[in-house]
Image (spheres, grey):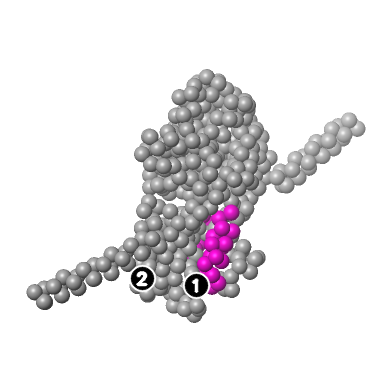
Amino acid sequence: MVKNVIIMMLILVLAVIFVKELAGNERIIDREFQEEKAVDRAKSVKKAHDYELTMVIGTDNYTAKESLTGFKEAIKLINDKGGIKEKKLLLNVYYTDGTKPKYLANIVKYCTKLNNIVCLGPYISGFAPSARSLMQFYAMPLVSPMTVYSDTLPKLDPEIYVSYFPELKIWVEEIIKKMHNNQVKNVLLISPKQQSYGSLIATAFHAYSNAHNAFSTVHRVNFTSPLNIGSIQSSFVGLEAIDSLDAIFFSGDYNDYVILKNFLKRINFTKPIYATEDINVENITHDDYKGGLIFPVLEIKQFNEDFRASYLKTYGKKTNFNVELSAKIIFDISTYLNTKDYQPFTFTNFLAKSAHDFYQNKDNYSITFKDNYKHLQELKYQEEHYIKTSDDFYEALIFK
């Protein structure tokens, strides 16, 4: 009888401990599943003929397609030199439409195969939180060169997401420094509402400027992308201080910028627009906004020169920081696989440390600024030259 009572008491104690653990950590079952998946993945990768990497691309995502060229060229260089431990790197690429549900469904479908070592992406910062949680569940490292690792993300243990993109603080400090150098004191901050890179950097910009008293005033206008002329017009009408503004800081993408620019032309607003690197599309320095468009660009100072030369030969153009960060991921993966046996979580930690250490040394990179001022001068010259030539022509006709 006493023996049965003791057994029952032990069972009750264990039950209480289990319930408390479950209540305090809802991921207890997930963690067991993750550990099992991590072990299975490590075994499968070891047995596989090649090291397989997977990338899911939105068909309308220019940044992802550009990044793919960097991945491909870096993989080609490594494979041409014999690969890694007698294995090749094999990149699997799958295309989908640009919606978040389709992207998430496809990374679960394609990235989570056991012999896959990494899921390359995402390329939209708003997709990162959901993609991160899904990939953690499957013990699948998620590594992106061009999305933000935000401080607002909940802590995951173990972490499975790595971003090679500079921290928001790096961008914000340089943008504000540039604005200070140009005597900007009163700013209108225009940013998208939804969870995106634009909203994250706008919030970081606003917080930094408040904490450091960076400007006399910062007015903020939020919009739902795609930007609507009616809503932005209402915001401007309600802004009493519009005449005192020195500049706009715009954190939306290029498509929204075009809509904003056309509106500003209509109301004859010609103060400078400072934007993020998200605006840096092809030929952007030839933009015709008369107030001046200024945006930051990351330049990597020290990089693999063989890669740069090979990329130029293959694609007929120089690399940019998107391409080089993509290549850096591949080279770091190669370093890890050459020195260690693959294990998903140690693999993730290795890449995270490599990305962090890179930005700790400012000799590795710099942030410079581009603008459209030279193009505006050319337009002004052409306009003046055309008018003068026309006047001369008509004057010659009159006196003839």
Closest to the observer: 177 or 233?
Answer: 177
Specify whether residue 178 is painted magenta. yes
**Distance Cα–Cα, label 2 vs label 1:** 16 Å
Q: How many marks?
A: 2
Where is residue 170 shown, x and y percent of the image?
Answer: 59, 54
Residue at x 39%, y 56% (from the top left corner): 284
Specify whether residue 221 is painted magenta. no
> Quick check: can you spot residue 238?
no
Of the two numbered discs 2 and 1 on the same chain, state the one appearing first in sequence.
Answer: 1
Q: Is residue 383 left or right of residue 252?
A: left
State the image quarter where residue 35 is shown. Answer: top right
Where is residue 214 shown, x and y percent of the image?
Answer: 61, 67
Q: Is residue 232 left or right of residue 116?
A: left
Type of amino acid under label 1: Asp
Type of amino acid under label 2: Lys
The correct choice, above or below, for 395 with respect to 33 in the image is below
Judging by the rendered image, the residue that carries numbered circle 2 is 265
> Quick check: can you spot residue 197?
yes
Q: Which mark is residue 176?
A: none
Quick one: label 1, few (<14), some, or many (20+) residues within 10 Å?
some
Judging by the rendered image, the residue that carries numbered circle 1 is 246
Q: Which residues are magenta?
A: 170-197
The correct choice, above or below, for 355 with respect to 257 in the image is above
